[in-house]
Image: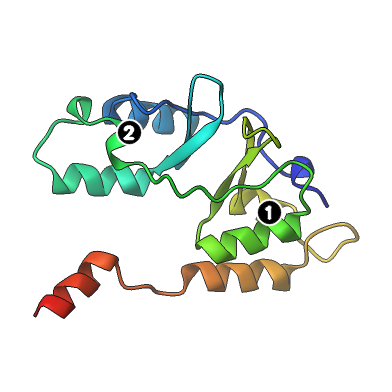
Amino acid sequence: MKVRDVMAETPASCSMDTNLGTAVEILWTRNCGILPIVDSDQKVVGVVTDRDICIALGTRNRLPGEITVGEIASGNVFACTPDDEVHTALSIMAQGKVRRLPVISTEGTLKGLLSLDDVVMHSGPGKGEIPYHEVVAILKSIFQAVTPEIALRREKAA
C-alpha cells in the first residue's frame, strides 16, 4: 500500500513568520496536532507540533502573538513521499519517534500529511491492509520513554 492511498491530501500549514496564536487557531480549526512549515515555494522547511507550542508558551514569559513559529520550529524534518510504501513511512516514523509525517514531492513541496491515525484506520487482517502487529510494533518504538534533553543536562550538571 502506498502513502498516497492513506494520507490526508489537504494538510494545514504555516510559515516561519506565523505567530503562535495563529498557529494554535489553525491547529484547533483543522483538528490537527502538527503544522508543516513551508516557504514561499511551498517547500517544507520545518514542522511545529501542538506540544512544541505548549512547551514554548510554558517556558517563555511572552504572549503567543509575540512568538513566531520560526523561533520554536524543528528544522529536523522526517518526511515521506506519496510513492513510498506505507511500511517505509512507518520505519521513518519509528526512526524519528514521530507520529506524523509531511508528505512531500521529490522537489520538497507539501503534498499531504500521513499520521498514525491514518495508518490505524487502514490496518487490519484483510488483504491489502497493514497488519495489526506491524502497527503495534511501530507504536511501541515511538512511545518508548525517552528522557528529555534538558533533564539529561540537569543531571550532568548536578
Residue 55, given in percent of the width and then of the height, sits at 24, 49
Q: Is residue 157 left or right of residue 81?
A: left
Foreground residue among 111 and 133: 111
- The reply to whether residue 35 is in sight is no
Residue 53, given in percent of the width and then of the height, sits at 30, 42
Where is residue 136, by image quadrant?
bottom right
Q: Which residue is mark 2?
A: 69
Residue 109, given in percent of the width and then of the height, sits at 62, 30
In front: mark 2 or mark 1?
Answer: 2
Q: Which residue is mark 1?
A: 119
Foreground residue among 83 and 6: 83
Residue 18, given in percent of the width and then of the height, sits at 34, 24
**Residue at x-position 74% and y-position 41%:** 82
| Residue 53 to residue 14: above or below | below
Q: Secondary structure at mark 2?
A: helix
| Residue 79 to residue 66: above or below | below
